[in-house]
Amino acid sequence: MNSQDRFADLWTDFLEGELDDDGMASLRELLSTDDELLAKAADLYQTHRLLGLTVQEHSTQRNEFVRQTMSKLPANHGEFVGSVMSRVDRAGVSVERRLPVVRWLLAAAAVLVLLVGVSYWQSHDPVAVVDPPATSRVRLASASQARFFGELPPPVNSILSVGREYVLTGGLIEVAFPAGASAILEGPAVFRVTSDESLALDVGRCSVHAPDGAEGFRIDTPMTRVVDRGTRFSVSVAETSETEVHVIEGEADVYPLGRPEADSQKRLTDGQAGKFATEGAFDTVAVPFDASGYRRRLPDRVVSYQATTVDGGADLLTSVTVQRGGRSETIDVNDLIASRLTWFHSTTSVAFLCGREQLPDSRMEVASDRSLVTGAINPGGSVEPLTSDPEMLDTGGTPGMAIGFERPVRNGPGADVVFFDLQTFGNPMDGDAFHVSPLAFRDGLRSHTIRKYDLTMESPEAMELRSFHVHFTTEVADSLDSWNRLKTIPRKQTMRFRGLAVGIDLSDLGYAENESVEGLFLQDAMDDGNFVDPVFIGGLPALDPQMRDAR
């Protein structure tokens, strides 16, 4: 085993917290005799910390090793690294008391060190560096629950900057290139658009599709260049820069980075896979082919919505765009299947209504209109979801709320019901978790818990809402009757809220394909001090047969 392979094994164990004393000694000795490995170790450690992939607690021995490694970096940026690492160490002393703030400090320090490391390697790279073009036609085609480090996700269809480093910490995005190639990246990943025909992937996984006309598209990793020859393939880059390539269809050529000679290439065809793990002699390590890691598309989901505006904030829903069965469609609100409130039981006496300052004569209108700022909010809930029929009595009964649809909703591909929740930045960023259950259980049916919305507080598509009032009470609304008659006091909300959205797939509740559902029961998941605030719930019309056939 050469030094590169030995380093890869030891370094992987170190990052995962599995390196014993003997291994630590071997790694320290290896780095003390090889300056290239030493600097590489610093870069890899910072990238690993940046993506949150290291074990959370570091022993004294591990911390001392990190400090020793950093202190031996080349002089032209060692002083800076030492300064940053000292701040990281000091921040770690109070991590138990200030965990959220410390995480941001750690991540920010990691980004700075990573950028310096990248700058160092670029300045010492023997391969000539060609300046990227100043403009790009590469765009973010779609996103699903995407999170970027230190920034909100770029809006869908926005142009991605050439040469800029993007850190995708979670979720999925699809990047579209002018000639027709596309790449779906999965967080965590660090990547850069390097031209209109290429992408650099430093760590993470991506799935590439290059149709006719897009041949020659390439993915550059720290060790390899993968060139498409008309194909579908996946590329996975580990924190140690090991690169795996799996060809789903067609062919792909793999070269050592910086040496694209024909005699150094490795061609992979349908059903073949290889791992490229060394920086010395270019060779392929055989790995089992695995097509399951390839993504042909992003998950079915609520993609976006449109609404009327009042004073710059969204008011009445006008349409919703969803992906079902892999196809995107925009549905007018008039084509959605309306819902009505049929049961309500809150467990708190804070507030159970939101809307205008003056409520309508029939409060039921608040729970069934198209407004994104009116609804029956703060229903009761349970930590554990229902396993039997909810009890809906004149007084008392199962905490939560029930809805009935204007006409039955049919279970089809993807989401069958759209659910909107109003949320502010003081609440969970992913949305308030809730359980959704059948109104009547039978064999095969079950409750389903939603903990992350399709459109979260970090989604550019989540619209800011107009101002509204919350109606407070000193009593508990323990039935639909009390919900409709209790005296309330309106209070205008001064904070800005956003409208979050998520799709409910009836298949997750055990319903068969094409089975119809007349209503659902909803409960807060009681996982924190916040309650779910439904403002619009609507069923989706049956999927157009032509769209279903096109899947």
Image (cartoon, grey):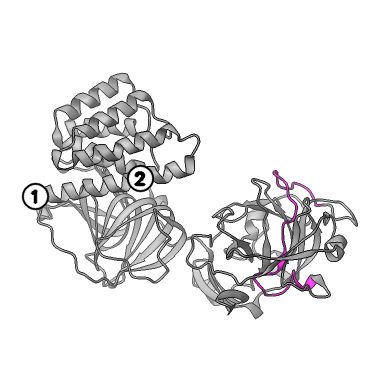
Spot occupied by residue 439 in the image (x, y as percentages of width and height): 77, 57
Q: In this view, does 337 lie above or below 206?
A: below
Q: In this view, does 83 lie to the left or right of 132?
A: right
Most frequent secondary structure within the magenta stretch: loop
Q: Residues within 10 Å of mark 1 (few under 14, many from 20)?
A: few
Spot occupied by residue 512 in the image (x, y as percentages of width and height): 66, 59
Residue 8 falls inside the magenta stretch:
no
**Whether residue 406 can be seen here:** yes
Label 1, secondary structure: give it. Answer: loop
Q: Residues within 10 Å of mark 2 (few under 14, many from 20)?
A: many
**Whether residue 324 can be seen here:** no
- Residue located beneath label 1 in the image: 126
Quarter of the rendering containing residue 362:
bottom right
- The residue type indicated by label 2 comes to Leu
The residue at the point 15 percent across, 63 percent down is: 131
Q: Which of marks 1 and 2 is nearer the N terminus?
A: 2
Quarter of the rendering containing residue 437:
bottom right
Q: Nearer the viewer, residue 544 or 366?
A: 366
- Residue located beneath label 2 in the image: 50
What is the distance, in whole Å, between disc 1 and disc 2 at their CAs?
Answer: 27 Å
Q: Nearer the viewer, residue 299 or 27?
A: 27
Front: mark 1 or 2: 2
Spot occupied by residue 116 in the image (x, y as percentages of width and height): 22, 47
- Asked whether the residues under the numbered discs 1 and 2 touch, taking CB atoms below 8 Å apart as contact, a structural biologist would say no
Magenta stretch: give its range.
Answer: 364-390
Q: Is residue 51 left or right of residue 217?
A: right
Label 2, secondary structure: give it. Answer: helix
Residue 389 falls inside the magenta stretch:
yes
